[in-house]
Image (cartoon, grey):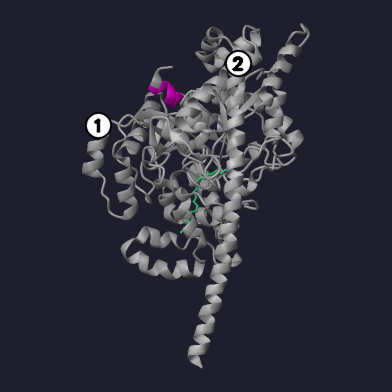
Amino acid sequence: MILLLLTTVLALAAAYFYRFWSVREKRQVELRKIVERKRAERAESVKFAKQSAEKLDVETRNKIASLEYSELKEGLQSGTISCIDAVRTYYFKAIQANEKTNSVCMFVKEAEQWAMEWDEKAKDPEFKKPPMFGLPMSLKECVPLQGYDQTRGFVQDTFHPTETDAVLVQQLKKLGAIPYVQTNVPQSLLSYNCSNPVFGTTNHPMDKSRTSGGSSGGESALISADGSILGIGGDVGGSIRIPCAYTGTTGIKPSHLRFSHRGVCGSVPGRPLINSNDGPMSTRVETNVDFLRTVWADTWITEQDPYVPPVTWNEEAYKSDKKLKIGYYTDDGWFTPTPVCQRAVMEAKQILEDAGHTLIPFRPPRVPEVLIMFLRAVCVDAGKFLSNKLMNDIIDPLLYTQVVLWMVPVRVQRFLASFIRVFFPRLGNLMNAMTLSTVELRNTYADIEAYRSEMAALMIDQKIDALLCPVTVTPALPHVAPSKLFAGTSYTGIFNLLDYAAGSVNVTHVTKQDELDLESDYEASDPWYALAKNSSRGTIGFPIGVQVATPPYREETCLRIMREIEFGVTGK
Ligand SMILES: CCCCCC/C=C\CCCCCCCC(=O)NCCO
């Protein structure tokens, strides 16, 4: 009797799994065909951009290609450069950068037509050129652009073109900017590498085996390989700052209410307290400043979205020469960065002290707990939304570790955590991060609010204007590492949890001495430290940035400090 029962249960289980497997296999075949179609569409768009670029003579192209942002802007304003020539130059540059990095999802074909329309309008002597007239801009793929997919790396979301531009895109078009290319992202957006089954893996321009960071890794790769002069990224846990730090570019994530989020889907919809925001990325802080100064020049965004407070650009704060008090830390008490990332902070500290600012040691309280709050609140439903989407998709192998963690039931994770904690305490503790219940989630939301209040009090009591710290714990990682080393987002995620403005700016490059210090001073005391150490080997010459953060609505002060660091490093 028992044997019969057991056999029946086993047979039913086998039948269930066979059915599950065959349905999934059938779906995978369908999805692979969709990928083929999408890649063919991308190849078409590259061909179109190539043909358009070839219509421009090489001499003009080389001249435009060599211009800095301010020179290009000036040339477009004065009429010495036409919009169509600028777009064709940047089509050309992006094609070249893409060959090296695989950073492009789609070229925007309409860019040609928009450029010609602006040139036509400019023929009228009465026409007043808008401030971004003819400036080619790259967009991270998830920024809603009418007529183009926002797949976020999911095959199931291809061939569903967006119907309405994001408020930011509407504004850019109104100001004369020309979105000419969409750039790659990791599947789900919740990773700091850059790979998905639709468009493949984006590479670091200096080394194909390493990532350009993520999730705005298409932007950082394109910009650092000279295929874009200014791009728009997005950041919910470091996705602008980490790719910038990895590639020697610079970018800022403003506090979330300085831009509109109308119609933006993001990685996990319905996430109240860990907010993503768009932000500019480029090679110079002044370029990012010019961008934000222009889009925040008036209350146009608020008029399109009443939820955005009418806070305009504060030139006084950016240009101020008031000496600031800046708290700094090289180690957040959760994940000690490799020596080069600590050296970068100390060098930036010296630059700021030389400029007359006061730097004091400061460490945000209880970072290990903060990381648990961050991971719980960034996923919201313990990864259910994401795992449902992933189960109906081709899963990118570079995301496997994270996917497994989203898929193991929370009760099982908690049970395993008590064993894992014995030999790998940091992972064991984080395995309590995914929420078990709405009660737990509500408590975490309350903890986040309390933490924001605590940090506000600390900063106000000590009269601290800004914070300086590492962006992350290593130089650019091999593609596979970020999904295993998601714990390395403690330095960036905290400022999304606090909703501070936070930017990253290049300070130095890895030297031979840094590699020697890595070997002698950096202990591989657990698997995460071992991975950080191993992955940092062989990175001599790679850029290293630092992070500057300020409370919400103080983006201008954040940018001022970034600019001063950049000046101290480059002399320009
Ligand atoms: C046991 C814990 C399991 C946790 C699984 C990992 C979950 C989340 C990792 C978060 C990594 C955040 C990377 C930053 C991504 C970003 O900023 N994206 C921008 C989206 O607009």
At 24% from the left edge and 33% from the top edge, which residue is drawn?
513
Position of 323 with respect to 300 (left or right) is left
First reached walking from the N terminus: tag 1 or tag 2: 2
What is the distance, in whole Å, between disc 1 and disc 2 at their CAs?
40 Å
Q: Which residues are magenta?
A: 564-569
Residue 137, percent from left and from top: 60, 25
Let me know if residue 249 appears in the view: yes
At 65% from the left edge and 53% from the top edge, which residue is drawn?
270
Check residue 431 for magenta coloring: no
- The local secondary structure at tag 2 comes to helix
Residue 196, percent from left and from top: 52, 44
Let me know if residue 440 appears in the view: no
Residue 45, percent from left and from top: 61, 29
Say whether mark 2 is within 8 Å of ligand 1. no
Question: For the residues carrying marks 1 and 2, which lies nearer the camera in this image?
Answer: 2
Badge 2 crowding class, 10 Å Cα cut-off, few under 14, some 14 to 19, many 20 or more, is: many
**Residue type at mark 2?**
Ala
Residue 493, percent from left and from top: 49, 46
Give the residue pinned by disc 1: 512
Q: Of all residues shown, which one is farthest toward the bottom?
A: 1
Depth order, front residue of 470/212: 212
Are the residues tagged 1 and 2 within 8 Å (C-beta)?
no
Using the image, tell me which numbered label, if any, was put on residue 86: 2
Q: Main secondary structure of the magenta part?
A: helix
- The local secondary structure at tag 1 comes to helix
Check residue 566 for magenta coloring: yes
At 50% from the left edge and 85% from the top edge, which residue is drawn?
6
Q: Quadrant of residue 416?
A: bottom left
